[in-house]
Image (cartoon, rainbow, N blue to C red):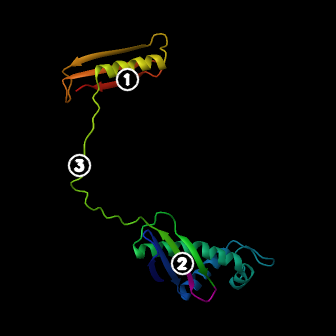
Amino acid sequence: MNLSVRETGTWQHTLEIEVPTEEVERRLVETALGIQRRVSLPGFRKGRVPLDMVRQQFADAVEQEFLDTIVPRVTGEALAEARLDPVVPALVRNLRFVPGQPLRFEALVEVRPQVEAKDYRGIPLTRKSRPVTDATVEAMLSRLREDSPLKNGSKASSSSCSGMPGPSSRTRIVTWSAASSALMVARLP
């Protein structure tokens, strides 16, 4: 297989692929043998039609099946050889196929653009944290009570306890048991 790669954009490459005549003929014979096993013509049993007749009578089917199998395989090999990682499947264009001649086509491949990170060190960053206060917890409980009316036997409560492991010695535990039996735990700083 002859391969040449052109960069046609920052994220696009065009691969010009040529498959030698010997490989084309060998693959055409393999495809014709596969079709020979499946077809029958008057006067011949299934799978016993002479190969020359198969290539003559079913020339379009042989060529189509040949192209359907060899183009994706050769394109994959060319991508591996060129060390390209496509984002989407390659677009095949300018396919030139005549039995007895090399198979030529172009594969248009889109790859991830090469991005070089520059001057990112020293950019000031600020970490924003939202503290959970008793008022925030009570507001959430009120909203839950309003949005989801409690069913019989359901309750919403809030409690505090200390001595639990974690960055804070005081933790607020908020529970809400309704039909979904949800549990919410919020730690206070």
Whether residue 182 is visible: yes
Q: Provide residue 26's location: percent of width, then percent of height.
A: 57, 84
* 3D distance between C-alphas at marks 1 and 2: 59 Å
- Say whether residue 107 is magenta: no
Lower position in the chain sequence, tag 1 or tag 2: 2
Comparing labels 1 and 2, the label whose residue is closer to the camera? 2
Q: Provide residue 100's location: percent of width, then percent of height.
A: 62, 89
Give the residues drawn in magenta, as a range.
Answer: 98-105
Comparing labels 3 and 2, the label whose residue is closer to the camera? 3
Residue 124 marker: 3
Magenta stretch, main secondary structure class: loop
Q: Is residue 126 above or below residue 25?
A: above
Residue depicted at x 33% and y 16%: 158
Badge 1 is on which residue? 183
Badge 2 is on which residue? 106
Q: Provide residue 57's location: percent of width, then percent of height.
A: 75, 80
* 3D distance between C-alphas at marks 3 and 2: 47 Å
Helix or strand or loop: what does disc 2 sit on? strand
Q: Residues within 10 Å of mark 2 (few under 14, many from 20)?
A: many
Whether residue 77 is visible: no
Q: Left or right of 59: which side holds 123?
A: left
Q: Is residue 125 above or below residue 153?
A: below
Residue depicted at x 31% and y 64%: 116
Helix or strand or loop: what does disc 3 sit on? loop
* 3D distance between C-alphas at marks 1 and 3: 38 Å
Q: Provide residue 62's location: percent of width, then percent of height.
A: 67, 77
For the residues bearing labels 1 and 3, Cβ distance under 8 angstroms: no
Amino acid on which the number 2 mark rests in the picture: Glu
Residue 33 marker: none
Q: Left or right of 127: which side holds 155?
A: right
Dividing the picture into quadrants, the one containing residue 7 is bottom left
